[in-house]
Amino acid sequence: MRKVKIIAVYTEHPTETMWFIASLNANNVVNIDKDDIGYGSVDWSGTWYSFTLYEHDDYRAGIDWKDTSFINSRATLDILGRRLAVGEILRYNDAGEHFNYKIASLEYIA
């Protein structure tokens, strides 16, 4: 397993980005053997919001926000059970709305 920093850009507003760090196997699939499978942050209109990731289901990671104003949010990110690669689209889901983020880079950090 390798720790990787993934940076993704919101397709509707490319100035808004998301990054997260997760362990990937040799096929670039997220390791789900831990309770917390990763952590990261997202930039919405110039403000960064931090989160941790956990296994929500076979295909989606749940997002636990560090900001207490999002405590009731049930947001997910479809990063599980699939190969992550530059150019792939990630779907962020929050309250039934879907937002597409395109992977801009994968940086191996450990």
Image (spheres, helix red, strand yellow):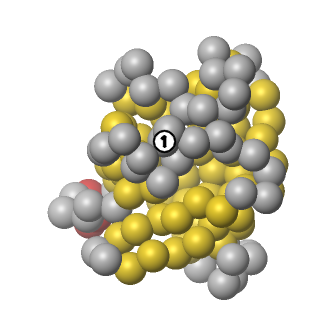
Does dot 1 land on a helix, a strand or a loop?
A: loop
Q: Residues within 10 Å of mark 1 (few under 14, many from 20)?
A: some
The residue carrying mark 1 is 80
Of 55 and 42, the residue lying toward us? 55
Q: In this rendering, would 45 be left or right of 64?
A: right
Q: As displayed, is residue 40 above or below residue 32?
A: below
Q: Quadrant of residue 16?
A: bottom right
Of 77 and 5, the residue lying toward us? 77
Of 44 and 47, the residue lying toward us? 44
Residue 14, percent across and down?
74, 77
Q: As displayed, is residue 65 above or below residue 101?
A: above
Q: In this rendering, would 6 be left or right of 97?
A: right
Q: As displayed, is residue 13 above or below residue 24?
A: below
The N terminus lies in which quarter of the figure?
top right
Q: Is residue 3 visible?
A: no
Q: As displayed, is residue 54 above or below residue 45?
A: above
Residue 77, percent across and down?
46, 55
The C terminus lies in which quarter of the figure?
top right
Q: In this rendering, would 80 be left or right of 35?
A: right
Residue type, label 1: Leu
Q: Quadrant of residue 68?
A: bottom left
The residue shown at (38%, 29%) is 36
Seen as rendered, the residue at the extreme bottom is 12
The residue shown at (69%, 27%) is 27
The residue shown at (40%, 68%) is 93
Residue 44, percent across and down?
56, 73
Please give the count of numbered marks on the rendered protein.
1
Residue 94, percent across and down?
35, 70
Q: Is residue 100 visible?
A: yes
The residue shown at (37%, 41%) is 58
Q: Quadrant of residue 34?
A: top left
